[in-house]
Amino acid sequence: MRIGELSAQSGVPIPTIKYYVREGLLPAGERTKFNQAQYEATHLRRLKLVKALVEVGGLSIAATREVLTLMDAQTSDLARLGKAQYALTTRKEHEPDEAWEWADEQVGELLAKHGWQVSPRNPARLQLAEALATLHRLGQDDYLALLDRYADTAGRVATMDVDAVLARRNLDGMAEAIVIWTAIGDSVLISLRRLAQEAETVRRFGETVFAAEAEQQA
């Protein structure tokens, strides 16, 4: 297929496709003429994946490139799966203050309580600590009362995720599943939480407190 057809089938504008090729997110098409190239079904599949990671998953171009490189790596060890999952989490520098030290300790205690064996280099561990540190700085420490139950729920979700990944027939399929379900699954869980919050207010008060805002945005 020509690039115009690739654009039409993927919903990605031609300039964006060319940008993805330059950034190494999408293999170049097979050159047929000086200014023309042919693309295959594999290009379309990869382009849809890139679009999902960037537009729905919210990954940066650099993070997307790293994730795809790990997903495509020709290795047969399970470490490849972990590296791909790590690459999906945004790495942020933390503020080394009293709040951070307190939050880091809280995360350590939570992991120990639930028996979770987690690498200290896991970016999600640092991300959670920084989130708790921020709540502490804002005087929202009572939110910690929910953390343990959140962890219970996350544990059940993780069990379902891993079961689904392991159902794939080979390591390549597992790597793809981890990338897609982690990036897009985060968006799914966030959306479900927002919907459930509104539904719970309706259950308790008989009407939604978000109605006025929803009408303004309609």
Image (spheres, grey):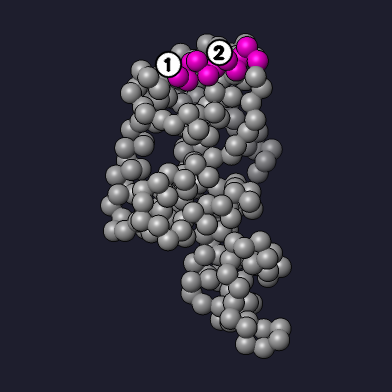
Residue 116 is one of the magenta-drawn residues: no
The answer to if 107 sits in the magenta stretch is yes
Q: In which quarter of the image is residue 31?
A: bottom right
Q: What residue type is labelled 1?
A: Glu
Residue for point 31% across, 37% down? 159
Element type where label 2 sits in the image? helix
Where does the magenta region start and end?
97-109
Q: Residue 102 bears which disc, if any?
A: 2
Task: Name the residue: 52% across, 57% down.
Answer: 69
Which residue carries the number 1 mark? 109
**Nearer the observer, 74 or 44:** 74
Question: Looking at the image, can residue 208 be seen?
Answer: no
Q: Residues within 10 Å of mark 2 (few under 14, many from 20)?
A: some
Whole-percent x, y for residue 199 in the image: 47, 30
Q: What residue type is labelled 2?
A: Trp
Assign a secondary structure to mark 1.
helix
